[in-house]
Every structure is written in C-alpha cells, then in structure tokens.
Image (tube, coloured by chain):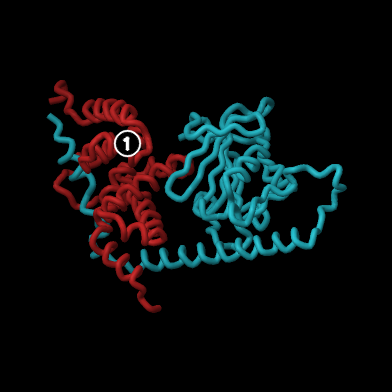
Chain colours: A red, B cyan
Amino acid sequence: MRMTDRDAEFVGFTHDHRPDLVRMATLLTAGDASSAEDLVQTTLTRLYLAWPRVRRADNRLGYARATLTHVFVDETRRAHRRWERTAEGLPDRPAATGLAPEDRDAVHAALRDLAPRQRAVVVLRHWLDLDVAETARVLDCSTGTVKSQTAKALAHLRAALTPDPTTL
Amino acid sequence: MLDLRTTLDHAAGDGRPDGRPVDPAPDLRRARTALLRRSRRRQAAGLGVLALVGVAAVGVALDRPATQRLPSDTVASSPVDAQVALVAATLDAEPYSFGLTPRGWTVGGRTPTAVTIVPEDGTTSDDPDDFRGKLVVMLDANPLEGREVERDGRTFRVVESDGYTTMATPTLPGEREGVVRIQFPDDAGWDEDAMLAFLGSVHVGDGAEPGVG
C-alpha cells in the first residue's frame, strides 16, 4: 500500500518515541507489561486518527503523553473489570534497568496500591516534571485536586518505599 | 531520602520489554484499519441520514395513530446535528432494558456490570471487554462528575474526553442504588440531546451489578 504523508510521519514518530510511551505506560499500569502495551497501541491509533492535530502540536511527544494519560484514565473509568484483573499481574518480563528486580517490583507494587488518578499525578508531576497547572489541564481537574492527590500519593510512596529501620 | 524521579525512571524500564528494536509496522497497520473503520462508519451513518431524510420527505408516518404519537418516537436529530436515529422500540439486554434503540446498532455483549451496543456492520471487535467504538451501558458505584444537565426532571452529568462522551445519572427509585452510566464514541453520530434521552430510557434490572474502580 502506498505510504501517505500521514503514514510516513506516523512511522517516524513511532520509531522515535514508542519506547518513551511504553515507559510512561509501564508506570501508569504499575508494571503490567501487557496493559502498558495495550495503552500504547490505543494511544498510537488515536494519534494516527487525529494526526492533523498532532502535526500542528508544538510538542508532539507532549501531545502523545497527554493522549496516553487520557487513554489510561478513560480505560480505568470504563473498564473496571479489565483493570482489576490485570492489576494483579506482574510484568511479563522484567525490563532492563539500573534497579534490582526486587526493588523494581517494590516500586511497581507501591504504584499499584495508588488509585489510577493518583498514579497519573505522580507520573506527570514527579517523573515528567509537569507543573501543577499543566498536570491539572492534562487530567481535566482542578489544581487543588492535583495538590491533594499528590500529597496522598507521595505519603503512600514514602511509606512503601522507605526501608523500615527496624529491619536493618 | 527518596529520590522519586530516579526511582520512577528506573522502574519505567527502557521501553523495549522484549529487547527488540522498534517496529512501527504493526502500529501503522492497526491505525490504518481504525481509520478505515471510522470512514466506513461515517459513510454508513451518512447513508442512514439520507434514508431518514427520504422517509421524512415522503411523509411516511409511524404505524401508531397520530394522537398517540410521542415526541420521542424518533429522537434523531437534524442531519447536521446527529446521524444515528433513536427509535422508540424496547431493546432487552438483561439485566438492562432500553426504551429507545439506536437504529442500526445491536447488543454486542452483556454481563451483570455492563452491556455493549455495537454497530450491526461488524466494525467493532468481538471482545466484550474492548469498548472501543461501542456504546457501553454500565452500573457503577463511582461518584458523579462532569457538567450538570437537567432533562425531563432528572439530573445528568456529562464528561467529554478524548473522543468519547460519558453520561451518568443516579438510578431511579426501585432500581438498584448506584449510577447508571453510558459511554460512546464522539464520531458515532449521536448528539447530546439524543443520548440523554437514551440514558433516560435505560432501565436497570434486578440482576445488574455495579462495577467498582
């Protein structure tokens, strides 16, 4: 089939940025590799369908990350059963990182205990370094909600990831 | 002290779970198929509108006598506003039933927590957990959120997000307590008023179970 301009640009974008989206989806799904892959596939399809808008975006990766967040929030909103089922699963295969597998699992487990929106807030604010206003815009909520969700999420992550001194 | 960014960065992995280089071909195939499906759906919806307009033009009346006809017999809208007509026919999808039926759509899957209504042209997947391109009706225990709309004495909440619209309203007295929610793709050809009418026609039966999430 003939490659259109849209196809060529989409292929270039996917080649360059698919791993970025998979990484973000891995955090959003708390390390569930198959759900992360589903999210990325859905996101890329939506991007292709909306490619004229993607083309006009100043920051295509930023646009894609916002779309990925929307897909994630939508999925958690409507596919309760699917997320409940997959949230029990561990990654199909450990990814290569600088973190020991047991530490990575602990981070994923701590993320899994967060509500989906809290997880999204953590990823947007503390991994992508978006400010409160931008995070609120992506999540379509108030800045107050972002602040309160961040506080709750961080408290949980600190408690879950800080070593217990009594076990040292 | 926890360096959260570094910890998350490591936990995110390298974005290549199988260790292979990125191959955009499968993504492109899926995306092209989705574009094709959307075009076909829009085409089909457009033909449906033409048929509807044709019927209206020749003045074909419903079987019911005019004195009994309800304004909601066809909640379709003008061709400009909406492309899928809702007709006053009961659609049973136990444990739910609907007083209005989208013309050209049928029940795709049903569980105690959700019913999916899909285009009859088979352009959506058979997976009951895949809600893409489908009209989904579900009962859940999540709080109401979104823009408030009053219609026929009931309060609805509407959220539009990334190509989909979700509408919700508390269940009626006598039904299981909770929120009945519908979700549909924005490009399916419905307008807000028609879908509020559809949601208002949903009856939640005894066997319905709320999803949690």
Kind of residue indicated by mark 1: Ala
Q: Is A145 displayed left or right of B172 in the figure? A: left
Q: B199 left or right of B20?
A: right
Q: Is residue A52 above or below residue A1?
A: above
Farthest residue toward the bottom?
A2
| Residue B71 vs residue A145, the one in the foreground | B71
**Label 1 element class:** helix
Residue B3 in view of the camera: yes
Q: Residue at x 34, y 50 (%)?
A: A36
- Comparing A85 with A43, the one in front is A43
Image quadrant of residue A11? Answer: bottom left
The residue carrying pointer 1 sits among few (fewer than 14), some (14 to 19) or many (20 or more) residues within 10 Å by Cα, namely many
Where is the N terminus of chain B found, in terms of image quarters?
Answer: top left
Residue A52, x across and y down, in percent: 37, 61
- The reply to whether residue A102 is in sight is no
User: Quick one: quadrant of the C terminus of chain B?
Assistant: top left
Where is residue A70 shown, x and y percent of the image?
38, 45
Horizontal side of A152 relative to B167 (left or right) equals left
Left/right placement of residue A145 relative to residue B118 reads: left
Q: Mark 1 points at which residue?
A: A136
Residue B62, percent across and down? 81, 53
Residue at image position (70%, 63%) is B51
Return the chain for callout 1: A
- Depth check: give the residue in front, B35 or A90: B35
The percent position of residue B22, horizontal first and vertical second, equals: 26, 64
Total numbered labels: 1
Give the vertical position of B139 relative to B73 (above or below).
above
